[in-house]
Amino acid sequence: MQRDVLKRIFDWNKSSRRKPLVLMGARQVGKTWLMNAFAQEAYPGDTVYVNLMKMKALRNSLETCDLSPSALLERIRVALDADITPGKTLLVLDEIQESSALLTGLKFFNEDLPDLAVIAAGSLLGLAVGRAKGRAAADDEPNERRGSFPVGKVNFLDVFPMCFSEFVRAVGKRRLADLLDVGEPCQVEPYAVELTDLLKRYLVVGGMPEAVNVYVETDDFRSVRGTQEEILSAYDADFVKHAPSALLPKIRLLWHSIPSQLAKENKKFIYTALKAGARAREYEAALQWLDDAGMVNQVFRVGTPRLPLRSYCDFSAFKLYAHDVGLLGAMSDLPPSALLEGDALFTNFKGTLTEQYVLQELLVAGFRPCYWTNDAGNAEVEFVIQGANGVYPVEAKAGINVQAKSLKVYRRLFSPPFAVRTSLAAAHDGDEVKDIPLFVFGPAVRRLK
């Protein structure tokens, strides 16, 4: 397996302004694998790996010592019988959310021991970051766990599920993946049939590394679906273990409603679709919990798409997506056999899988997309992104039908530098609308950053 984000970890390691690095992302997106892969290549024989989930005695010991780097490192040295030398050793702190002492201690590693390379990650670590940023916590959450994360004293790196080009490389199509990564739609046009078939498979398998590995090893979509269902079961167990009890029913209701919300003609999230009379304020904390855990992606509406884009978002109107297209298919109980039905996979439940895929490619490329509707509600563009030279609309079309009336309305109102339309149709580099095939959308759109 090869992950593009690994290069960014090497860049972090070389930076003169390096702070402890914190990998953020949903559970099972490959954070532990990335830390180990980096360690094996950059610090062979000089890595100290600490799994705080498994080392209860060390966790207890850390909670009783002061938070100076020397004291924390001494407890780790003794527990692992290991040498830790700043400037030579890499310290990997996995499942760091289990130790409030080390969470807070990252601040002092940055201030007092900058020569020590430290990487941390953990399941639901985003919850600790959310608390540190002042987000609401439930009443039954222990006070000592709130606000302990040293925001501003660490480097963050988002880890997403594997993107399409990573999937292509994982299934043994290295040269094809290299062509995709160039981001030139015309160069990959001769391979459109093969890439479309691979994209269908990706929409079923998704980008969760375990599901991808099962597919590579078995070439069996039923085995992949079994793996996806195991991941979803593990998420439900996380709800029970980590969520405040007062929020648990609402978290589950929100999570399980995602497929039905996206199956609507108008995909805007409607609270009353959860239950009659439901109001936003009743579910805000539960939705924030899911967002902090990295399990959902909120795409907010923008009515006037100007720079800076986030300043014009309407945060009361949004669409709610999952974090992985394969898991969304499993949550929707979409049969993998749909893969064999021509292009039906792209149009199933109103093209939602296509939109989910496009969103994931945008996130990996570093965009924070919104969506646009006019005030009358009869024109909508799936995504709007802020690039280096302006704000661009992105129309995601399922199949080969590229008729885009809403895109025409948007262009007439706002005159963007150009519009992006992605579908199964052939590439076309027009002055006003650039058509990008879905299978090369991610690498191509990165050029707008």
Image (tube, grey):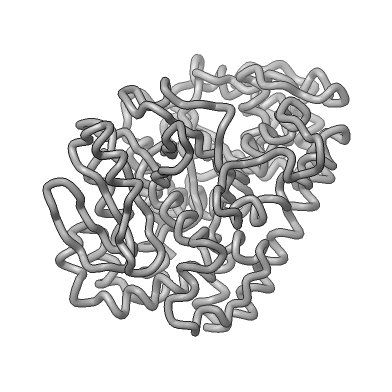
* Residue at 32% over, 54% down: 404
Residue 148 position in % (x across, y down): 68, 20
Q: Is residue 301 left or right of residue 440?
A: right
Residue 397 position in % (x across, y down): 38, 59
Q: Is residue 44 left or right of residue 328?
A: left
Residue 344, visible in the rendered structure? yes
* Residue at 41% over, 64% down: 398
Residue 49, visible in the rendered structure? no
Residue 295 position in % (x across, y down): 62, 46
Which image quadrant is residue 419 in? top left
* Residue at 77% over, 47% down: 238
Q: Quadrant of the C terminus?
A: top left
User: Between 40 and 217, which is closer to the camera in this rendering?
Assistant: 217
Q: Quadrant of the N terminus?
A: bottom left
User: Between 117 and 421, which is closer to the camera in this rendering?
Assistant: 421
Which image quadrant is residue 169 in? bottom left
* Residue at 42% over, 47% down: 382
Q: How many marks?
A: 0
Q: Is residue 288 above or below residue 33?
A: above
Q: Is residue 276 above or below residue 197?
A: above
Which image quadrant is residue 13 in? top left
Residue 309 position in % (x across, y down): 37, 27
